[in-house]
Amino acid sequence: MEPVRAGDGRQSSTQRRAIARPFLAFLLLLAGWSCAASDHYLSGRYFYEQGNYDRTVWEAGEATLLDPEDGSAWTLLGMAYAKKGSYREAVQALERALALGFRGSMAPGAEGSFNSPWYWLGYAYYHDGQLDEAVAAFKKAVESRGDLAASYEWLSGSAIRQGDWETAIDAATKGLALTDPVGRSWHPYYLRNRSLCFLATGHFDEALEDADALLSGPAGKNAEFLAHCYRIKAFAWAALGDTRKAQTLLTKVKQAEKDYDSEGHSMLLYLVTEDEGTLKDISSTGWLGVETESCSKGAVQGVRLTEVVENGPAARSGLRRGDIIVRLGGKAVRNGGEFKPSSFAAGSSVDVEIMRGQDRKRLTITMGSRAERASVEGVLTSAPVWEPLVNAGHERRLLLQSVDAAEKKGDYRKALQLCLDYLRERRDFLVTKRAVEVEQKLDPPPVISAEAKERAVLAQKGVSEARDERGFDRAIEEYREAIRLAPWWAELHLNLALALERHGDYRKALKSLELFLFASPNNSEAGNITAKMHELESKSGNAESD
C-alpha cells in the first residue's frame, strides 16, 4: 500500500533536517542542557530517516531508558520495530506511548504520519495479520488526526481484507477529500481500494468510474495500476453481461501484467458469468487434478502425489495421495520436470504406472480439462473481493433460471414477480431487462403502482428544481426507485437517462437509453435515441476502440 516515491534530484527538506539534527543535539549539549534522552531521540530520528532501523531501535531504546515518560521516544521505537518487521515489539512500544497519553504531532516524514502511534499500531497489527486490531487502530488514527491521508488508505485496505466493504468505501471516500499535508498524493490508492469495494458490492458503474479516473491520472501509466484498472473494468462488464468486452479488457491486463495468470482469469470470468465460452482457450488442455513433489525412494524415481483433488480426474481413476507416478503416457517420469499432464488433450485416455507401497500398478486415466478445475476446485483468488462477485453472479443465474422455468409454464406473472423481488434488493441491468421482456408477454399488462407513480413525480420535480449535485442525486435516486417498482415503464428510463446526462454520468445514461429502447421497441424516436446513444458512448470513453 505504500506509495512509489519519485525524487526530482533536489535536496529534500527531510534530508536537510536529517543533516541538521545531530548539530542541533550538539548545540543543546554545548548550552549545558541535561538532554541525553533528547539527544538519543534526535539521533534516532536521523537514523530512521536514513533507513537504519537497527540503529534507530538502539537510539530510541536509550531515550526510553533515560526518560521512560517520553511518549515520542516510545513511538519512534515502535516505528523502527515495525519497519524491521518486529511487529510484536512494535505493538508493545506503541501501546506504551499511548498509555502515556501521547497521540503524536504532525511532523513531515515517513508515510505523512511520522509519530502518530495509532497509525503505527495499525501498521504493525496489519503486517502481523491481526486485521481486527489493525482496523480498530486505524479508526483511532483518523479520529485523532482526521487529516492524515495515509491512515485512511490503510484503514480502507485493512477493511477490504476483512470484507468490510462499507468501512473501506467510507475511508477511501474521506481520503479522496483530503489534501495530504506533506504533499504526497494518496488518491490512486483510494481509487484502487474503492473500485474493488464497488465491484464487490455490485456497484458496477461506480467501479468503472473509479477505474477510469485512475487510468486518466499519472498512476494510469504505472503497470500495476494499469493492470488493476483493466481487471476491475473487465469483471464489472462481465457482471453487467458484456462478456466480449470483459475478454477484451482481460487481454489488456495480460499486456500490463508480467505474471498474468491466464487460466485463473478465465476460470474467474466463467464463475462470474457461467458462460462456458469463456473457457474455450483452456477447455482442450489436459488436467489431472493432483499436486506433486519429486521423489527418489531407493531405485524408484518419480513424483509423489501430495494432494488429489476430490472428484477430479485422478481421484475418479483410482489414484491416491502418496502414490508415486513413475510413467505417464508410456514415458518415464523421474522428477517434476518430466511430469506434464497438460501435454495431453482433455478427454484422452492415458496409461499411468505407479508405485503404491511395494506394489507396482498400471491404471488408465481419462484426462480432465483445465476448464473442469473451475467447477471442481471453485477457483477464487485470495482477495476477498471476488467471492461476493462470484456469489452474486451465481445468484443472478439461479434467478434467471427460475424466471425461464416460470415463463415456459406460461406463468408470466410469477416470472415478473420473481424479477421484481430480486430488484427490490439490488439494481441489476440484466434482471431489469428480463423483467421488461416478461412484461411484454402479459395480457393485460401489469398495473403501475401508486408508489411508482408518486416516485416518478418526485423525480421529475427534483430534476426541475435541482440547483446542485445533491439535488440531482436525490432526483436520480427517485427515478431508480420508481424503476425498481415498474421496470417496464419506458418513460422512466428515458427521463432517467436525461437526468444522468445532465449530471455527467454518460455511461449510466447510455444504459438507461438502451433499456428505454428495449421497453419501447416501436418508438418513433428510435433513430434519434440511437444517435444519442452513440454520442453518449463517445463521451463515456467506452467506444469499442477504447
Image: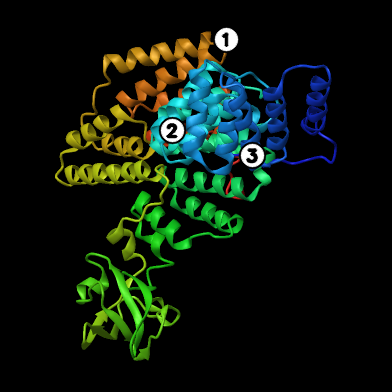
- Say which of marks 2 and 1 sits in front: 2
Q: On the image, which quarter does residue 67 sit in?
A: top right
Q: Position of residue 335 (x, y in %)?
A: 41, 81
Three-letter code for the amino acid on which mark 3 is drawn: Pro
Name the foreground residue: 353 vs 83.
83
Residue at the spot 53% in from the left edge and 55% down from the top edge:
248
Residue at the spot 53% in from the left edge and 59% down from the top edge:
260
Pointer 1: what residue? 467
Q: Position of residue 205 (x, y in %)?
A: 48, 35
Pointer 2: what residue? 159
Quarter holding the N terminus?
top right
Q: With 50 as the anchor, is 255 left or right in this view?
A: left
Three-letter code for the amino acid on which mark 1 is drawn: Arg
Pointer 3: what residue? 3
- Say which of marks 1 and 3 sits in front: 3
Query: Tag 2's secondary structure?
Result: helix
Residue at the spot 55% in from the left edge and 25% down from the top edge:
117
- Mark 3 vs 2, N-terminal side: 3
Query: Tag 3's secondary structure?
Result: loop
Three-letter code for the amino acid on which mark 2 is drawn: Ala
- Mark 1 vs 3, N-terminal side: 3
Mark 1–mark 3 CB contact (< 8 Å): no
Name the foreground residue: 331 vs 140.
140
- The answer to whether residue 246 of the structure is visible from this angle is yes
Q: With 73 as the anchor, is 167 left or right in this view?
A: left
Q: CA distance from mark 3 to mark 2?
A: 19 Å
Q: Position of residue 284 (x, y in %)?
A: 38, 73
Name the foreground residue: 469 vs 7.
7
